[in-house]
Amino acid sequence: MASFKKYRVGNKFKLSQIDPGDTAFCEGNEAAQREEIDALAVELDELQNLLHAEGKRKVLLVLQGMDTSGKDGTVRWVFSRTSPLGVRVAAFKAPTEEERARDYLWRCHAVVPRTGEIAVWNRSHYEDVLVPVVEGWIDKAETKRRYAQINDFERLLVETGTAVVKCMLHIDKDEQRERLQARIDTPGKQWKFSMGDLEVRTKWPAYQRAYESALSATSSEHAPWYVIPANSKRHRNLMIAQLLVKTLRQMKFKAPAPDPALKGMIVK
């Protein structure tokens, strides 16, 4: 099995060091890979049941990436066998008027995972150190302050029982072009396309720099970043499923002790 070490963001990180086309986690033929994804999905469901039964801790999966990088697809495949009662997805879009009237982390606090729950953030608080940076809405000093605030926010989550798993879905510009074109050419997918996607695409280099800076500044011991090569959708799903299952296994859940009052009880 491939190691996650190479993909964990550390000191002197450069996004260019990770090949978006890497498929290190795809072992065997296509059928074997699909079987592995399904097996991981089943195990994830079992682990989530234990997380819920223990009733003490939580898990937060953060998914970031450029448009078409596969955040929705990741949720669809990785959690394909997990009970919807144990997983909650929050999508972060442009802030509403109510959200803009408060600090930028306010909307995040409202959707952190509950005890026994896995929460998935499709985009996240990191939007506030990506878009404003690229658009020039905040200066370097404010950006640095936000990095520190985000680190403190995530430390709070970890210290109060939340395991934080952060994944940056890494695709290249050519792959994005193909996926955007597929949306345009497929009537059933055109609803996913926005003209704004093309405007953001013109700023690709600036967004890559913003990601590199944000990941470097906020990949901590308590909440590290992992860069997920995502040109291959199957590789993306396998890698994130393996990472999430590994994280939950390490939490070593303990189911509640049997109730002595139920011993020998017979339901009639």
Image (cartoon, rainbow, N blue to C red):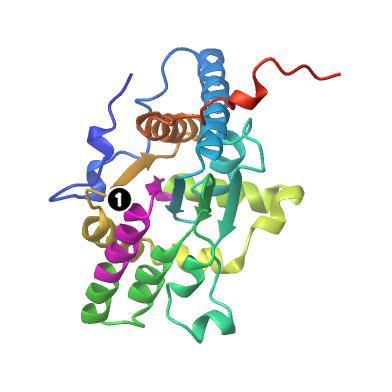
Query: Where does the N terminus fall, quadrant-wise?
Result: top left
Q: Residues within 10 Å of mark 1 (few under 14, many from 20)?
A: some
The amino acid at mark 1 is Ala
Q: Residue tagged by mark 1?
A: 223
In the image, residue 43 above or below residue 17 = above
Q: Residue at point 44% right, 47% down?
A: 174
**SS label for mark 1:** loop
Task: State the image coordinates of residue 268 (x, y, percent, origin top left).
Answer: 86, 18
Q: Residue at x 66, y 23 (%)?
A: 262
Q: Quick one: 216 or 204, which is closer to the camera?
A: 216
Q: Nearer the viewer, residue 249 or 80?
A: 249
Which of the 4 image quadrants contains residue 249? top left
Visible residue check, residue 208: no
Return the residue nearer the eye: 227 or 172: 227
162 magenta-colored? yes
Residue 197 in the image: x percent, y percent? 54, 63
Task: Give the image quarter of residue 191.
Answer: bottom right
Q: What residue is at 18 percent from the left and 49 percent from the top?
A: 13
The picture places residue 257, in percent across and down from the top left corner, at 51, 27
Residue 195 lies left or right of residue 137; in this view the side is right
Q: Start and end of the magenta stretch?
A: 148-173
Q: Is residue 228 left or right of residue 33?
A: left
